[in-house]
Amino acid sequence: MLYLRGEGHVQRCPGDIVLDADIDVLTPTGPHVIGQFVAELTRRRGGIPFHVDLDPRWVKKCIATGHADQADRYADHVLEQAGHVLETQHVGAIFATPPLLERMAQDDRLVELVRKQVRAIYWGGASIDADTEHLLRTEVFPDVQLHSSYGGTMGMCPTVDRMGLADDEPRIFDPFSPHITFSVVDPETGRPVPYGARGQVVMNHISRSMFIPNNDERDLAVRVEPLPGQLGDSLSDVAPFGVFGGEEVIEGVY
């Protein structure tokens, strides 16, 4: 888990995250690239990262072995530390996974701390249903900018939701075309599904540092028409397969 604090003004670069005057971000670190990515991005913009480490692998093990109570205790332990940072630091943005945001929304003290000083929330790393996301956006944190992300297994960089969407519109994710592209296909035939239909996400990464063609992701999504000039599909309503590669997919907190 990662907390950020920095000085500056609200800004957004193409394919980048929204940053506020002070930043508060929640992601796993260690071997997970997203923690390193966010920390480096924050430093480059004059911010200071506050680390509260999160090990999502342990949570998944607890759930897989039937010890959901231990997973709950671990999530509470993480949010207890999060509350300490929010109480002692002036932060203006939060980077978190949806399960932690949902748990945070059930704590009146944490909600009050967020409403008092946070102006942007950026989530990723796990799925969230449209109704819950809309509730967080409009009811729990109505004065906070809420932005979502999607990063495929081998995309190596998360893409954020399309700008200009209304609160009641589904989040749409556009790839970093032409180097990273998405397609949405029927998992049985491998053929593209119609726009508006649901299928498996296939990712292509073609850059100076990496060549990964036709990588089957463990995610399902709705196929959305691309922006003008964009290669590949855009995505909406992303969620994992229930079973992938013969194993049950467990999100846990990441």
Image (cartoon, rainbow, N blue to C red):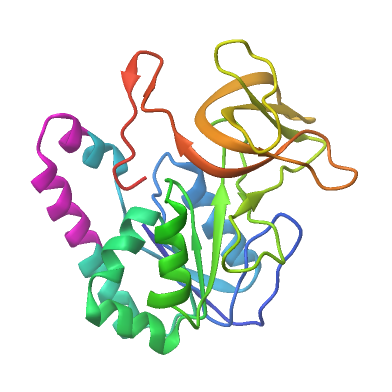
Q: Residue at point 18% right, 60% down?
A: 77
Q: Position of residue 53 (x, y in %)?
A: 31, 55
Measured from the top left, where is residue 184 in percent x and y? 65, 28
**Residue at x-position 47% and y-position 70%:** 137
- Is 193 left or right of 3, judged from the image as shown? right
Depth check: 154 or 6 in front?
A: 154
Which quarter of the figure has residue 58? Answer: top left
- Which residue is at a point 42% across and 28% down the rendered structure image? 241
Residue 28, image x, y percentages? 39, 50
Magenta stretch contains residue 222 = no
Q: Main secondary structure of the magenta part?
A: helix
Outermost residue, top side? 189
Up/down of 100 relative to 192, above or below: below
In the picture, which quadrant includes the N terminus?
Answer: bottom left
Q: Is residue 70 left or right of residue 5?
A: left
Please state, as top left, top right, bottom left or bottom right, where the C terminus lies in the image.
top left
Q: Is residue 77 magenta?
A: yes
Is any atom of residue 79 visible in this view?
yes
Q: Residue at x 71, y 46 (%)?
A: 174
Q: What span is colored magenta in the figure? A: 61-78
Q: Is residue 108 above or below residue 223?
A: below
